[in-house]
Image (cartoon, grey):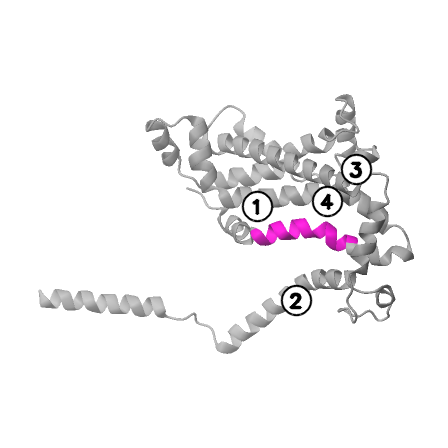
Amino acid sequence: MSKKIKDETIKRLKHKKLKKRKPNRSFAGDLFIYFILFLFALAMVFPLVFAISSSLKPLDELFLFPPKVFAQNPTLDNFQDLFVTMSKSWVTFSRYIFNTIFITAVGTAGHLIIASMGAFVLAKYDFPGKKLFFTIVVTALMFNGYVTAIPNYLIISKLGWIDTYWAIIIPAFAAPMGLFLMKQFMEGIPMSLVEAAMIDGAGLGKVFMQIVMPNVKPAWLTLIIFSVQNLWNNKAATFIYSEEKKTLVYALQQIQSGGIARTGQAAAVTVVVMIVPITIFILSESQILETMASSGLKE
């Protein structure tokens, strides 16, 4: 008996040693990898730092050559001038903000609901035409928005949605990226979990809302990021003509094109436009990484 215990103890010690074993890589190799990662991180963060720094530069520093990365005499005058210019518009600044928030919120919510429900059916149920439908969705991912611009305009015009919010919101509901992402992620949920819940008396709606959606939280948070970024930066100039229905990005870009005198305001516009997408990305960064790591796994 004592020999058996001794053998088990030796096995456990060996197992611990194996677990503690370090990767077969030298310190110099680790240092090189970290250096390469640092260079990539620096290249990615530089445009953001430069944009913020430029928005804080007075006008004379914006025209320095060679340009300097950081502001020597930082000031908020560019943002103050921007808000003064916006306040002089015959459409109030708050109206542009409302238009953008309404389009972004409704479009994102609709896209999330429709993509999630469609993905659940595609991932967990078999029906005639399932493969064909998913093939169409994947094919739609290959088409750039410029390719479908004319057909989209003709369809929206026939439906009478020109110069309305729905011209931007309704097409956002049908974006193929959301359906593809959610479907791939939902395939990782065991069907036995869904069946067990239904055996216990849960309806299909309850299963979807209380079991499926919480388990794919990283996927729908990632979907929200993509949708918000797309809708927030949409100028909507193709479909919306009334000034009181224009988006914030469109109004800010009109200021940006005001010439040399508005160079400082143009730098401030860049920061204002990117604040919301970057903030949402930072808050959901861990969920996005989990989505990218798990979306290819199967049951």
Viewer-proximal residue among 235 and 3 = 235
Q: In terms of sequence position, does the residue under pointer 3 or pointer 2 come before the other?
A: 2
Residue labelled with disc 4:
233
Q: CA distance from mark 4 to mark 2?
A: 25 Å
Span highlighted in magenta in the image: 269-283
Residue 169 in percent (x, y) is at 69, 32
Residue 294 in percent (x, y) is at 48, 48
Q: In the figure, residue 203 lies in which quadrant?
A: top left
Q: Quadrant of the C terminus?
A: top left
Residue at 11%, 68% (x, y): give it: 3
Q: In terms of sequence position, does the residue under pointer 3 or pointer 1 come before the other?
A: 1
Q: Are marks 3 and 2 in contact (CB under 8 Å)?
A: no
Residue labelled with disc 3:
246
Residue 178 in percent (x, y) is at 59, 38
Q: In terms of sequence position, does the residue under pointer 1 or pointer 2 come before the other?
A: 2
Q: Is residue 3 left or right of residue 189?
A: left
Residue at 63%, 44% (x, y): give it: 226
Q: In terms of sequence position, does the residue under pointer 3 or pointer 4 come before the other?
A: 4
Q: Secondary structure at mark 4?
A: loop
Residue labelled with disc 2:
42
Residue labelled with disc 1:
222
Q: Nearer the viewer, mark 3 or mark 4?
A: 3
Q: Local crowd at mark 1 within 10 Å, few (<14), some, or many (≥20)? A: many
Q: Tell me, yes or no, whether the highlighted magenta stretch contains residue 85.
A: no
Task: Count the numbered circles shown.
Answer: 4
- Is residue 174 something one can see in this rendering? no
Disc 1 marks a residue whose amino acid type is: Thr
Q: CA distance from mark 3 to mark 1?
A: 27 Å
Disc 3 marks a residue whose amino acid type is: Lys
- Depicted 170 relative to depicted 88: above or below: above
Viewer-proximal residue among 298 and 262 = 262
